[in-house]
Image (spheres, rainbow, N blue to C red):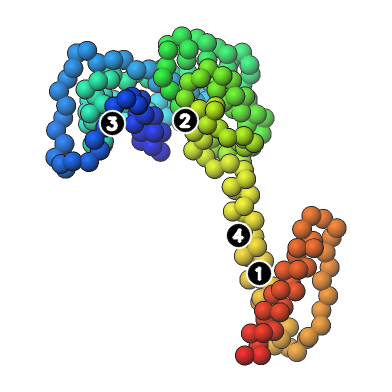
Amino acid sequence: MLWTLVFLFLISIDPLETLDLGGSRKVQKPKEDPRREDVNIAVVYQHYAGRSKSYDKAFKEVIRKINDATAVSSLRRLATRYNFQPVDCILPTGQFFVKEVLDCLCNNVTSNNVALIIFVTASETYDSTTAAEQYFLTAASYTGIPIIAWNADNAGFTFENDLSPYRIIQMAPPIEHQARQEKLEFEKKLLRLFRAMLALLRRYNWPKFGVVTSEMAGNDRFVTAVREELERFSNKSTK
């Protein structure tokens, strides 16, 4: 995941220059250029016991390999022009407030003139912390700095508008995507169960049964699906 986050930004850092990602398979390590431009990358995450060190080590290792030209071949040529430096901004564990967000953005992000914000969360609990993380993304988007975000509690992150004007790439699937996937999985399971019930009714020659539904969204659709399945089952039985 870390390679993906960093790579998405690095390939667009200089839009006037086209990088040759093809060519010979033998990629030579580029020569060191003392005039390399320093580029700061903000790494923002919450403090987790036993996990913050892993995050920090992983991000720093990726950036070190890019600077040493030992990263994947498509990134090695960047080492001839840029020297990437991480800028840490560790938010409190659990719910954090406006003070912590402003302190991170003003004293760490904008003051160091970062070119990219990488925002990562690890908590999978959808609670008040989700709202705090949502606030950080909204506030950070006003700086105009590109943001790459991965949120473990992605069920809580949904945007009604296109994220392009906010310069945010959300790596986690939004709630709409998850809802569609869960709905499809539920319908498949329900269909398999209903087919099994129809097979038992046919086996014991029980041609009549009732369907009881509540007055909630989707009840008409459920009755329609039952009728369609009965029709399909009847046509299959007559063949």
Label 4: which secondary element = helix
Q: Nearer the viewer, mark 2 or mark 1?
A: 2
Which is nearer the N-term, disc 1 or disc 3?
Answer: 3
Q: Nearer the viewer, mark 3 or mark 2?
A: 3
The spot of residue 163 in percent (x, y) is 55, 32
Q: Which residue is mark 3?
A: 18
Question: Amino acid under label 1?
Answer: Leu
Mark 4 → mark 3, Cα distance in angstroms:
43 Å
Q: Which residue is mark 2?
A: 148
Label 1: which secondary element = helix
The image quadrant that residue 11 belongs to is top left
Examine the rendering and report whether any part of residue 62 can be seen: yes
Label 3: which secondary element = loop
Mark 1 → mark 4, Cα distance in angstroms:
10 Å
Q: Residues within 10 Å of mark 1 (few under 14, many from 20)?
A: some
At 78% from the left and 68% from the top, the residue drawn is 223
At 63% from the left and 18% from the top, the residue drawn is 97
Label 2: which secondary element = strand
Q: Do tag 1 and tag 4 residues touch (Cβ < 8 Å)?
A: no
